[in-house]
Amino acid sequence: MDTEETDEERAGFTRRQLLAGLAGSTASVATVGTLGYARLDPVDRLEVRVWVSERAAAYDGVAERVREYLEALLSYDYWELDLSVGGTVAVSREDGASVTSDGEWPATLASGAVGLGGVDPVADANLLVTDGQMTTAPTGFALPHVASVGGARHLAALPPFDELEGVRDGGAVHRIVPDERPVRTIQILLHEVGHALGLDHDHGVVFRDGERVVATPMLSSYAWDPDYEGDRSRCGREYPPADGRERALSLAFSTCARRGLESYDGTGL
Ligand SMILES: [Zn+2]
């Protein structure tokens, strides 16, 4: 018995050390990917920080609105959510995808992790919101722990979360909202945060709700994309055909995605 307790304590200590190391050293994907730990325990505290580009910051209240939605949509029993706003960041482009895929946002975070540039990354998800367009994919991009998305003007146009149609009146379970630009943008933002925490598209589902078909954040618009090849989630739930039904969006992660988040172990891989 004594031996077992000792082993558990040691395992917990190792994980805390690792998380502290990740938070304190670097947000770089290469470092995270080469640690070589086989399996870690799920985290019990999730750190998420939101920054806005200088142009995104011109839309009043955008960072606080994003923070409010993430607070509502990332709060689960299995972790304590540590959500913060990092402030305004100067970036050379507003494209919500290429600012990460071309390496600029990851490099800014990596510099910040070693004390350069004034950006202080957190351990789990570091999200940049830009003034990028939201009409032509890709509109956002993510790597483990790193995400970015455009659409600041649409996010600033969101009502307070509790006043959102579909959430206001008993929509607490699926948070089903009409497929309109502002909510589509916050759903894509959630999608990228999900990727940053290790989720993939097949964690998402599409389901029928009366005459509507509803896509959850990780499947998002792939639900209506004829070129998307998946026909079920990785948890085995089949996707019903849209058959011309009205499209709607869920801002709640699917059960399958929530299972993935619950097992998130701090690596995002
Ligand atoms: Zn995606």
Image (cartoon, grey):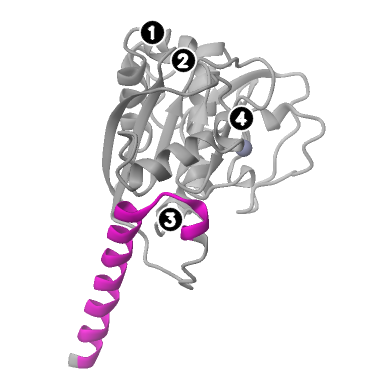
Disc 2, SS: helix
Disc 1, SS: helix
* Mark drawn on residue 58: 1
User: Few, some or many C-alpha atoms within 10 Å of disc 4 (few <14, some 14-19, many ≥20)?
Assistant: some
Question: In the image, which is nearer the foreground, mark 4 or mark 3?
Answer: 4
Mark 2 touches mark 1? (CB < 8 Å)? yes
Residue drawn at x 47%, y 24% as measured from the top left: 91
Residue that carries the numbered disc 2 in the rendered image: 152
Amino acid type of the residue tagged 4 in the rendering: Ser
Mark 1 touches mark 4? (CB < 8 Å)? no
Q: Quadrant of residue 228?
A: top right
Disc 4, SS: helix
Residue drawn at x 76%, y 32% as measured from the top left: 241
Tell which circle, 2 or 1, labels the residue nearer the N-terminal end.
Answer: 1
Residue that carries the numbered disc 4 in the rendered image: 98
Amino acid type of the residue tagged 3 in the rendering: Tyr
Residue at mark 2 to residue at mark 3: CA–CA distance: 28 Å
| Residue 96 visible, this angle | yes
Disc 3, SS: loop
* Mark drawn on residue 264: 3
